[in-house]
Amino acid sequence: MSIDRKQLILEAASKSFTMFGYKATTMDQVAKLANVGKGTIYTFFKNKEELFDEIIKGLVREMKVAAEESYDESKSFYENVHRSLMRVLEFRKEHQLTIKLFQEEKEMGTPAVTEVIGTLEKVVITFIKDRVVQAIERGDITDCDPELTAFVMLKLYIALIFDWEKNHKPLEKEQILSLFQKYIFDGLSR
């Protein structure tokens, strides 16, 4: 029974963080949404930060699964990086909690949210970095700094998907792959 209550609390908190953001969510709101007494929440979580942390850990697990499921050993390194990055960024666009967190971070710079955004970015960079290391070891790509390469890849995708769309028609997945191929994998030299 207590597992059910804990799950109820996590679902209610996730709903509250999604609706109101981290800063505006209170334990009273979570208790009301979960239909439990506030004291019940404290039997599972010390404070709002611990509750938020638990939800983010679940979000990170979901994101990792989404990235790993998009990876296909029969595809090239380039295709797999593209597939993984597209899936992670689609996840970010589809998942209401991440949308709210990125909005809150941009508008208010809430420290706890900024930290979470950094954690999500580190997870994605580590995932790509590991794939870059494997590609170097297989001889698929030239030797490079795997972490820096992963960082540049992620930032280019974010720029092409989120920043470009602010003032331009969204790019198709194939266009993004083509640009990625040109700028990252082929370079601009003749």
Image: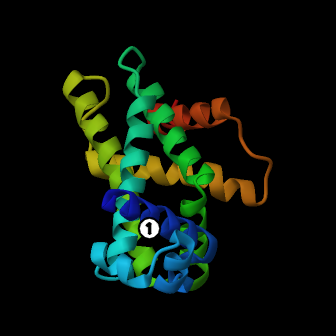
Q: Residue at x 58, y 53 (%)?
A: 95
Judging from the image, what secondary structure is the residue with disc 1 in?
helix
Q: Which residue is mark 1?
A: 9
Instruction: Report the front residue among 35 and 131.
Output: 35
Q: Is residue 142 above or below residue 111?
A: above
Q: Residue furthest left?
A: 137
Left or right, 7 with reference to 126 = right
Report the front residue among 139 and 36.
Answer: 36
| Residue at 52% from the left image edge and 29% from the top image edge | 190
Q: Please provide percent x and percent y for residue 36.
A: 47, 75
| Picture layout, residue 105 above or below residue 142 | below
Please tell me whether residue 186 is drawn above or below residue 74 in the rendered image: below
Please provide percent x and percent y for residue 5. 39, 63
Disc 1 residue type (three-letter): Ile
Dividing the picture into quadrants, the one containing residue 67 is top left
Q: x, y (%) of residue 93?
A: 61, 52
The coloring applied to the image is rainbow
Which x, y percent locates residue 70? 45, 30
Q: Residue furthest top?
A: 74
Q: Is residue 142 above or below residue 155?
A: above
Q: Nearer the viewer, residue 134 or 15?
A: 15
Left or right: residue 51 compared with residue 24: left
Q: Nearer the viewer, residue 110 or 40?
A: 40
Q: What's the residue at 34%, 58% (across, down)?
A: 1
- Near mark 1 (Cα within 10 A), the count class, few <14, some 14-19 or many ≥20, is many
Q: In this figure, what is the number of numbered marks?
A: 1
Tell me the residue at 53%/72% (across/down).
Answer: 35
In which image quadrant can residue 7 be found? bottom left
